[in-house]
Amino acid sequence: MIFGMPEEEYFAPGHRACAGCGAATAMRLITKAAGPNTVLVESTGCMEVVSTPYPQTAWRLPWIHGAFENSAAIASGVEAALKAQGRKKDINVVAFAGDGSTFDIGIGPISGMFERNHDVLYVCYDNEAYMNTGIQRSSATPFGASTSTHPAGKESKGKTEWKKDLTHIIAAHGTPYVATASISHPRDLFKKVQKGIEIKGATFVHILAPCPTGWRSDGAKTVEIAKLAVNSGVFPLFEIEDGKHVIQRPKKVTADIREYLKLQGRFKHLDEKDITFIEEQVKKRYDRLVKLAESGL
Amino acid sequence: MVRSVMEASHAASEAVKLIKPDVVAAYPITPQTHIVERISEMVADGDLKTEYIRVESEFGAISALVGAAAAGSRTYSSTASQGLALMNEMLFVASGMRLPCVMNVANRALSAPISIWNDHQDSMSARDIGWLQFHCETAQECLDLTLLAYKVAEDHKVLTPALVCLDGFTLSHVFEPVDVPDQKTVDAYLPPYKPLHAYVDPARPVTQGPIAFPTHYMELRNEQNEAMMNSFPVITQAFKDFADKFGRAYDFLELYRMDDAEFAFLGIGSECGTLKVIVDKLREKGEKVGLIKMIVYRPFPKEQLLEATKDLKGLAVLDKAISVGFEGVLFTEVRSAHYDSDHKPDLRNFIVGLGGRDIRYEHVESIYEMLKSGKGKKIEWMY
Amino acid sequence: MVELTLAATITEPGSTIKYKTGAWRAIRPIIDIEKCTGCGNCWVYCPEGSVDIKDKKATIDLDYCKGCGICANECPVTCIKMIMEEK
């Protein structure tokens, strides 16, 4: 055991992810938390493509890929099959997908899986755009970020919408457990994935996974950027368990959002007005989250 | 074996009860609803033990089927028209992953304009998805061919999903006597599904559905095509075993009064009932006419068709689907099949029954007139 | 002759280890092993899983290390240096 985690690598080296890929780190941690008695159901995206270049595979677990928007729907079928075969109690079913698949094209099937409460953990690795196809905007892309379908330009400041609050949309389905996590806080991520698996029913863990290629950042700073996202309140780490909010981090905002934005080329076009707006919105949402947690909601 | 009068939809439901799938995914669409509703009643009364997933869309249905089959289970779903169209992306995935899913399709016209009535545009536009395709004329066939489809699909030499089609309303909602076989004989005919490559076993982790680069894709697609071409003997044997066990003989084509026929109709599905009536009427008048009813559409029964048409002067191909910008779908394939043949009967295309337009005796008689006399256009729309 | 498996299923788990991504590297990590405390930061954050911790010391498998520099950035005792690969 290292760092309180098993040493086995269920996501083998030799995969074709970019150097400094946050999602690849996430894959290693998620699969360590899930353990060997797990079947993974994955959507088309970065992690799917880099991990299974036929005839090679990076996976040391059973792994199924169908299409882009339906890891939740396919996982529903896998779960039902294992139940029918009497093996569900022995095998964890983990569906995972990027933000494009989860927030946009897959939201219908995801809603179906959560509404029917299949015993599946759904993990979203969020690199905040359609990275695999070339950094196009998704509804998970943060406000003001420049992407290839909403670039900054003479008449554009990048994304004009705030990041979709998918975590609460999923929670509204009445799911027993929903959590956010970050690769910068691996013990917290590990615990949450394990919790998501142990708790029966449809559960959701939303993981922030910075992408140096898409975020235009230094690959070496991938974890540092994720840490700043958490500590500045941009991406708080919290759980909604049985409908109640619990915040893990930050207990208090300790990092400056500007430090976070400065490290990423996708934000370099923002002016003082934009940054102030972002600061206000992040504070508003973080404060609301704190209020929910404090009122036992 | 019990004989009762039932809706053809329910005959399909009875087949599902007998084949005992692990997972059933159900999403309603007219005119398929009676099939899945009857199955849900069976589940509610404990007569069928299955994981019945009330999915959020047809896309969810086919995705659940792929997941369950990839996990090594026998699966079932059914749909029609818009539902089949919505599944489109995943239909290719299911066959590409060589998963033996089976679905009934209650044939219905495609929007726009929206229509709930019968034609073959849905299953015909799905001819390239890499699924076997069977077509039923009677309620009995709805039960029999659904059962048979599993036997062929799950054969390790085939491992290809299958559509079993029944005309919406004109067959699905029609009441006919049906022999429902007993469970024991069905179990002897169709043993439990044994996955070969698609399963979930942490002790033997398998990666299913990788990305294939240009170095491999073409060979993989060829392998899939070969598997369907190699299904001919498996289908033949399945027909034979079916006849032995259940006493009803089927084949790729049903040849009705074709022995000395000079002219013939080529039809699919419930319209063949009407065609048989007219064939009998014409025969009474001394006409040498017959009917070729196509039961298996994929793989395309080219050899069987050429054998059936080898002495014909003319063949009227009835199409309940049009490939817009060209001609009737079945007509194109029939003509192509005959291209290299030494004997080419006069091939005529008749577009019939689109959007539920009734195919009347007068239509068929008129078709025969044109076929025999050579009058009329190569492609005639029979309004 | 292309070797195929049925439906492109892959039955050899972790076979990407045959592809040595270390060849992608332009800069490589050097660990000052004396200063290394074996804390495991580099192990946990490495996207490749190319770090091993044995007897409280870290080693990096250069067959797979892509030279991203996360390990050097996250080392709490800054005992990892990134240097240019020499041709």
Image: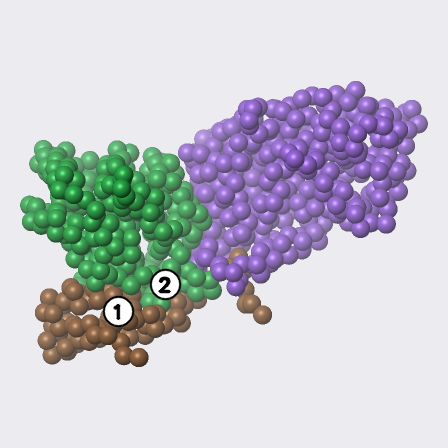
User: Residue A7: x, y in percent?
Assistant: 25, 67
Q: Are marks 2 and 1 on the same chain?
A: no
Q: What's the distance in space between the residues labelled 2 and 1, CA to CA?
A: 14 Å
Q: Residue at x 26, y 57 (%)?
A: A212
Query: On the rendered image, what quadrant is the C terminus of chain B found in?
Result: top right
Q: Colour of chain A?
A: green
Above or below for B99 versus C54: above
Residue indicated by mark 1: C67
Query: Helix, strand, or loop for circle 2?
Result: loop
- Horizontally, residue A276 falls left or right of residue A105, namely left
User: Residue A113: x, y in percent?
Assistant: 36, 39
Residue indicated by mark 2: A16
User: In the image, what residue type sits under mark 1?
Assistant: Gly
Query: On the rendered image, what quadrant is the N terminus of chain B found in?
Result: top right
- Horizontally, residue A256 falls left or right of residue B258, namely left
User: What chain letter is assigned to the residue under label 1?
Assistant: C
Mark 2: few, some, or many residues within 10 Å (few <14, many ≥20)? many
Q: Residue at x 38, y 55 (%)?
A: A48
User: Residue B140: x, y in percent?
Assistant: 67, 33
User: Residue B323: x, y in percent?
Assistant: 65, 36
Check the image and name the residue furthest to the right: B286
User: What chain letter is assigned to the residue under label 2?
Assistant: A
Q: Colour of chain C?
A: brown
